[in-house]
Image (tube, rainbow, N blue to C red):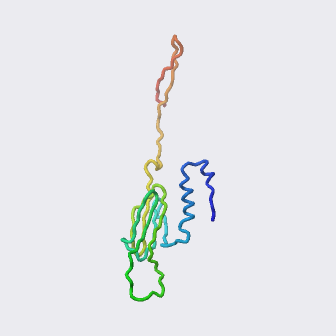
Amino acid sequence: MTTFDFAPLYRTSVGFDRLASMLNSANRQDQGNSYPPYNIRSTSEDHYQITMAVAGFSENDLEITTEQNRLLIIGKRADETEEQGEYLHRGIATRSFERRFNLADHVKVVGASLENGLLHVDLERELPEAMKPRTITIGKSETRLLDVEQTPGGKKAKGKADKAA
């Protein structure tokens, strides 16, 4: 198992401690747990989609929640009624699951759909206006000039504003 030393990062950066804990927890969790299989893809610059294979689950068996930059998908199967016959091979998993995803700041779930045994969760990164790049126009500004006026008691500064040409 590989460990990372983030001490040099902490000396020059503030607020990245969460990143280090996420990397450590990602290395620990889900080792050997691959059920249910899923894909994560980028559909455009600010849009993503998680597709999860949930064969045998209906909309009522699935629960999707988000809380503080975490997406949680839970699948709970109702107890199956006994079918006639004996299984010679049972390869279709019907067990309950819980899958967690860490979301970046400003990424939110915008929708979910279930079709042909695939759960699609659509995500979008929505930057606040304050974080979006903006263009600053260059215009004329006022400059402040100081005139020094001689008075009988000494020097006195007098301000006069002129527009720059």
Q: Quadrant of residue 73?
A: bottom left
Q: Is residue 85 above or below residue 141?
A: below
Residue drawn at x 41%, y 63% is 65
97 vs 158, nearest the viewer: 97
Find residue 98 and report its horizontal and vertical position in percent.
Answer: 46, 68
Q: Is residue 8 above or below residue 78?
A: above
Q: Residue 155 location, x and y as percent?
A: 53, 16
Q: Residue furthest bottom?
A: 85
Q: Is residue 105 left or right of residue 24?
A: left
For image coordinates 47% across by 49% down, the residue present is: 131
Nearest the viewer among 86 and 120 is: 86
Is residue 82 or residue 155 the one in the foreground?
Answer: 82
Q: Position of residue 130 (x, y in %)?
A: 45, 47
Q: Position of residue 119 (x, y in %)?
A: 42, 70
Residue found 63% across the figure and 51% down from its top: 8
- Residue in the image at 43% along x and 76% along y: 55
Q: Is residue 72 left or right of residue 26?
A: left
Reply above or below: 83 against 138.
below
Where, quadrant-wise, is the N terminus in this rendering? Answer: bottom right
The single residue placed furthest to the top in the displayed view is 152
| Tag count | 0
